[in-house]
Image (cartoon, rainbow, N blue to C red):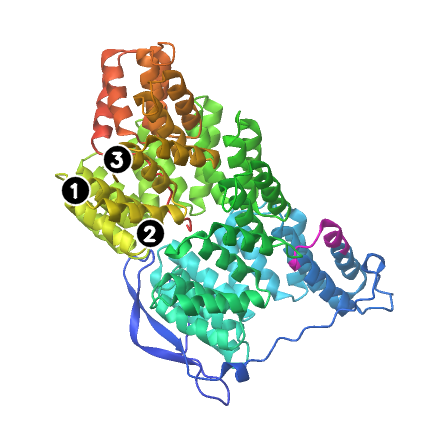
Amino acid sequence: MTTRIRIAPHVRMAGASCLLVLGAATASYASTAVEAQDIPVLRPAQADYAKICVPPTRLAIPTAVDWSRWTPDSKGASPAEALAFARETLSARATDDDNDIARRVLESLVKSVPAERAAALYELAAADLAGTNTATEQTVKRLRRALALGYRRAAMLLGPIYENGLAGQAVDLAQAELFYKLAVQARLEGGALKLAALATQKRRPEEARQWIALAQQMMGARLGAGDCSQLSAMATLYLDGKLLPRSPTIAAEWLEAARVAGDARASRLLGELLLSGDGVPQDIARGLALLEAAADGGDLASIVALGRWYRGDYGATPDPQRARALFERAAAAVPPDTTALMELARAYRDGLGGAPDAAAAERTFARAADLGSVAAIRELAGLAFNSDPPQVERALGLLRKAAAARDLAAAAMLGRWLLSHSFTPDALAEGVDWLGKAAAQGHVGSAKALARHHAARLDMAAAARYWQMAADMEDPEALVELAALRFRGAVPATGDGPERLMQRALAASETQPWGFVAVGRALRSGWLGQPDAAAGFAMFRRAADRDDPSGLRETGEALAVGDGTERDAAEGWRLLEKASNMGDAGARIALARGLAAGWFGDPDPEGARERLEAAATAGVPGAFGELGSLYSRGAFGDVDPAAAVEWWRKAAMAGDAEAMRELANAHAIGFGADIDPRESVAWLERAAGRGDPDAMRRLAYAYHAGVGVEPDKAKAEHWTTMARFSAPLPTVEEPVAQ
């Protein structure tokens, strides 16, 4: 049954003018709704928010108190001041010793101060959830007790616990929905937004629309009462595009109002929009001025954003030394900022502004991990995988730790590694299990990985089910894959047909520009008819025009070689350089490949080797395979089969499907390796399982002729069919937001 929620057409501030203006037009609710719904577009009214805003009251915390000895009977600080100290210490992610002191203070309040008991229980639970894999059943008990004592903010933490299966609880969406409704009763707009997200996942667009409108109403009421944090909160709704149609233009209006009200975060976000020209006219001078002013005021995120600008993000001319100095400045703050530490660690790893320093990168990632960053744990796992020799067990242990903390990206990374690097039943089952957990929580990349896995094992029904799961999340690539499967008759024609699926893929690509690349590849390769390189190039250009790195890469490569368009080597180089500076690993490889092949002038194999070795040092898997190919062709002198196989093996261990296929070839003909037909087929199986069409064709022949395996006509026919409309996995995954 659809929930009906009464909502006012607009929100007014008591005794003052309306602070939310209903837009002249309405926006289409695209998300994952079955049908588009109209949602009012709200803009900030023209008002002096600096005068309207009421600064939040902050209790002064005594500085002369030895908090390690504090008890409720101490005379130096009241229980309310003790609560404020503990809250501020834990939110600042201070040292472990300071955090332990703060927790002891909270435990004393729970035990002996009834007036602060509920708030102290809440803060203890919040600290558990902020850590890495530290939430337990005790966390849930604390929150339930706080809620029973009337502290209704606890509902906003209990909801995600049951929604995501945290703290030892099973996933229970009904319980999560109940807690979010309790939060709504407490006038917490976050509860309404969470309910909107759940309704969207369940494809109930009308209910989602009403919850969003109610959230906006509540946000407007708080704004009318002088809470100007709602200005940037409203901007976020229009900026992230998760619940409302993404509109950087409207977001910029809200951010400008928040900036006037003194919100440093809003200044940073507005500055980044102006630098990138995302939905607003690009204004580099003003964007930098906003970031520099916020950075001078001590806003660490703005310092990091400036570092990204000088690193070459947003298409800027790189200044690596200045970028590194800014990351070091932000990382040196006390308490340390995890985002700054992560960027500095990547600078050490990639050699930004200096020589690559794997040891410094590992130390800095470890600092971020100690502060609770599961992304840092993932990065440490990547370093372990790419070390020489690879520390596989350590890497897997780190990923299991992050995945157990419900980090979906870690679960996906772990699952994909297990599927592509092992054929033991236990390892495969574990990989499928981790990917299944991530997919069930909405991780679209995991659903797509499972689709490919099941297709590679002849289970097309399961493959179609996971492609459908990803398509239901309006993932452009999944929509294209499903369209191709239905066009070829590989799965039953239920639901939308190929034409409608492609229309949805194009619509989804408007907010996920990398989707145009998926559409372009399908058109260029002829997945849904005759190959059309020109139509594919047009799609790549649409992605590039939106500054999507994969679109820039595909467009640059096409221009460099004249694929589907007139050849323009200079423009191809420019676009590839831009994508590379934005962190696109595939563009780094394409530049090196182009230098070796003479795309941009005379062949320059040494320039290619220099770029590839730097990329390999930074752990870019594609660099290993490309080096192997160059050694196999004698690009650096004589053909060197042993060196080629060594690089291919490193690439294959990092999950590179093309390198797996090359290893299969090496074992088939004895090129730098022993002739071993069974080992050859094993590598072909791995490469085909990751979507490599050439490996699929080779595997089809192996099963047809019985080379390295027993003849199997059914498997031969399957791989022949799969090869017709399969493509390799993208070099760089779509953003997860995924």
- Decide if residue 375 is on the left or right side of residue 63: left
Residue under numbered circle 2 = 548
Structural distance between the alpha carbons of marks 3 and 2: 29 Å
Dot 1 crowding, Cα within 10 Å, few <14, some 14–19, many 20+ = many
Structural distance between the alpha carbons of marks 1 and 2: 20 Å
* Main secondary structure of the magenta stretch: helix
Q: Earlier in the sequence, mark 1 or mark 3?
A: 1
Q: Which mark is residue 533?
A: 1
Q: Which mark is residue 445?
A: none
Amino acid bearing label 1? Ala
| Residue lying at 33% horizontally and 55% vertically, measured from the top left | 32
Please provide the residue range marked out in magenta: 91-101
| Residue lying at 31% horizontally and 33% vertically, measured from the top left | 604
Residue under numbered circle 3 = 602
- Of labels 3 and 2, the one closer to you: 3
Where residue 591 appears, as percent x and y from the top left, is 33, 39
Q: Which of marks 3 and 2 is nearer the N terminus?
A: 2
Q: In which quarter of the image is residue 652?
A: top left
